[in-house]
Image: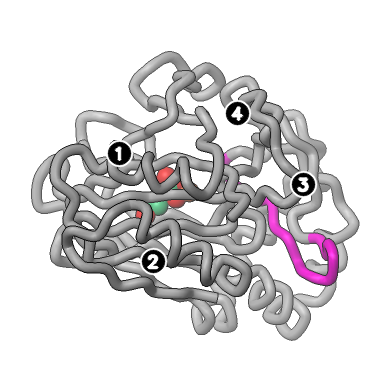
Amino acid sequence: MLTTLEFAPDAAPEQIADQVRAVWRDSKVIHITGVKPDGDLRDYYWRFFEDVGVPMALAEDATIGDRDSQRTGSYWAEVRYDPAVPDAYRHSANAQPLHTDGAYTSPDSVQVEASPNAVGTGFLGCVAMPANGGATTFIDAVDVYNTMHDEAPELLEQLQATDVPHARSGDRKVAKVIEMKGGLPVVNWNYYCVDADAGNEVKSLGEQFFRFLERSPGIAANLQRVKLSPGDAVIWKDDYVLHGRDSFDPERTSARFLWKTSLLIDA
Ligand SMILES: O=C(O)CCC(=O)C(=O)O
Ligand SMILES: [Fe+2]
């Protein structure tokens, strides 16, 4: 599931694109490591994006408006430790529970045209990382499915049979939390964005899945950790894995600083 690609510090974005294309089909998470771009990391990786797909302007800003109106129309959002911004995982040092980024959005949300082969892909690029903790965590949806099959078969059946609405920032999407598509399980999940209007049964199902992910031995055993270094990036097929992060020792404001965006990759 996880592929690590090592590069020289001065590798060109086009080299990254070539290597990513070569492993794309058989990877769900790709850790790009070793590059030390001069200047703004966003400019460097933008050139990589242009070679492999189409960026999506889905960024949110936790410092403006309320949770329903935080879409900025821009491509990049900060995931940056800042104790001055309350109630936002993106600015805290807490562990972040497993989720998908696209739980309430689709390519229609930003009016980009998706080719039939395009895959919704998350991106994090690293500006700063503290010494202790702060790895981004991933689990293959196949492992989620198999673990549930063994540990919680009834919950798995219910999730496969239930439409769950997610909503935030003016976007709404109704989907199964886990569903077989083309022979592979796909996931759509963010506990904190289950629509407040969802019925009690749906909400209770969400509570059970949240607790399952937190407590299941099989989930913990299959989790993979990617700890980014400055210059590194990680991309992941958002519908095919769940991701989250470990808590970290905050050290100081901006001690952990990642640039986040999403794109459609049609490698
Ligand atoms: O901080 C991380 O490593 C993950 C952040 C994340 O998943 C998010 O902001 O959606
Ligand atoms: Fe995320």
Q: Secondary structure at mark 2?
A: strand
Rounded to the nearest angstrom, the CA distance separating label 3 from label 2 is: 25 Å
Q: Earlier in the sequence, mark 1 or mark 4?
A: 1
Rounded to the nearest angstrom, the CA distance separating label 1 from label 4 is: 25 Å
Q: Secondary structure at mark 4?
A: strand
**Amino acid tagged 2:** His
To which residue does mark 1 refer?
Answer: 42
The one nearer the camera, 66 or 143, is 143
Q: Is mark 3 within 8 Å of ligand 2?
A: no
Rounded to the nearest angstrom, the CA distance separating label 3 from label 4 is: 26 Å
Task: Identify the residue at image location x=19%, y=56%.
Answer: 230
**Amino acid tagged 3:** Pro
Task: Identify the residue at image location x=58%, y=58%.
Answer: 237
Q: Secondary structure at mark 1?
A: helix
Rounded to the nearest angstrom, the CA distance separating label 1 from label 2 is: 16 Å
The one nearer the camera, 88 or 58, is 58
Q: Secondary structure at mark 3?
A: loop
- The part of the image, by quadrant, that contains residue 16 is bottom left
Q: Are marks 1 and 3 in contact (CB under 8 Å)?
A: no
Q: Earlier in the sequence, mark 1 or mark 2?
A: 2
Residue 254 x %, y %: 16, 42
To which residue does mark 4 refer?
Answer: 168
Picture disc at residue 31: 2
